[in-house]
Image: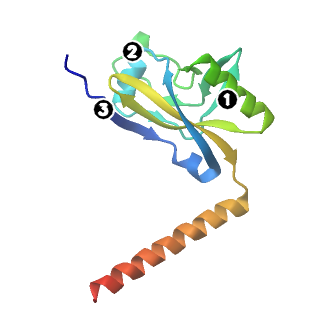
Amino acid sequence: MAEKKQTSRVIAQNRKAWHDYFVDEKYEAGIALYGTEVKSIRNGAVNLKDSYCSLKNGELFVIGMHISPYEKGNIFNREPLRDRKLLMHKREIMKLGGLMTQKGYTLVPLSLYFSGKNVKVEIGLCRGKKLYDKRDAAAEKQANREMDRHMKDRSRYD
């Protein structure tokens, strides 16, 4: 039997999460969507900027993820900012819930992508950065840019 090749295509990324948090672990979760939401996601009309995950009654939800209404969806469109259920194994949800309450972690969606025909969310178990951490990260990024620039100039004249 021929195997189907799983391809993944990134739709949206949450770059603000990498700026505001230290990402300790990453998890993959499915997401419960309606048809017009999937069509809108295929058009790239999704924003993860201020979204986060929350645990309610033993289920994991993503809150604040904006999926624009599908332009041809008329009455079948859903609320753009509604809470959407994430699909994970129960033991993973319980483990994440325990870490969130004990150690003060936050669950943040990092990216949204297609895995085959399914929409998946990559969520990160994150710790918040302080202002000085953000400054250190910006300074390190700038130093790396400077080193790359000098190395490029140096190799040009050798």
Which of label 2 and label 3 is nearer to you?
3
**Position in image of residue 92 (x %, y %):** 62, 24
Toward the viewer: 150 or 34? 150
Quadrant holding the C terminus: bottom left
**Position in image of residue 79 (x %, y %):** 53, 19
Amino acid at circle 1: Leu
Q: CA distance from mark 2 to mark 3?
A: 21 Å
Above or below, 155 relative to 126: below
**Position in image of residue 121 (x %, y %):** 49, 30
Which mark is on residue 35? 2
Q: Residue at x 46, y 77 (%)?
A: 147
Amino acid at circle 2: Gly
Decide if residue 69 is on the left or right side of residue 100: left
Asked if disc 2 and disc 3 are in contact, CB closer than 8 Å, the reply is no
Asked whether residue 128 is in view, the answer is yes
**Position in image of residue 7 (x %, y %):** 30, 32
Tag 2 secondary structure: helix
Instruction: Estimate how packed mark 1 is, as few (under 14), some (14 to 19) or many (20 or more) residues with alpha carbons within 10 Å.
Output: some
User: Residue reaching furthest front?
Assistant: 1
Q: CA distance from mark 2 to mark 1?
A: 29 Å
Above or below, 42 relative to 103: above
Asked whether residue 70 is in view, the answer is no
Asked if disc 2 and disc 1 are in contact, CB closer than 8 Å, the reply is no
Q: Which residue is mark 1?
A: 96
Q: Residue at x 68, y 37 (%)?
A: 106
Decide if residue 44 is on the left or right side of residue 62: left
Tag 1 secondary structure: helix
Question: Which of the marked residues, 2 or 1, is nearer the chain's N terminus?
Answer: 2
Instruction: Estimate how packed mark 3 is, as few (under 14), some (14 to 19) or many (20 or more) residues with alpha carbons within 10 Å.
Output: few
Amino acid at circle 3: Thr
Q: CA distance from mark 1 to mark 3?
A: 27 Å
Q: Which residue is mark 3?
A: 7
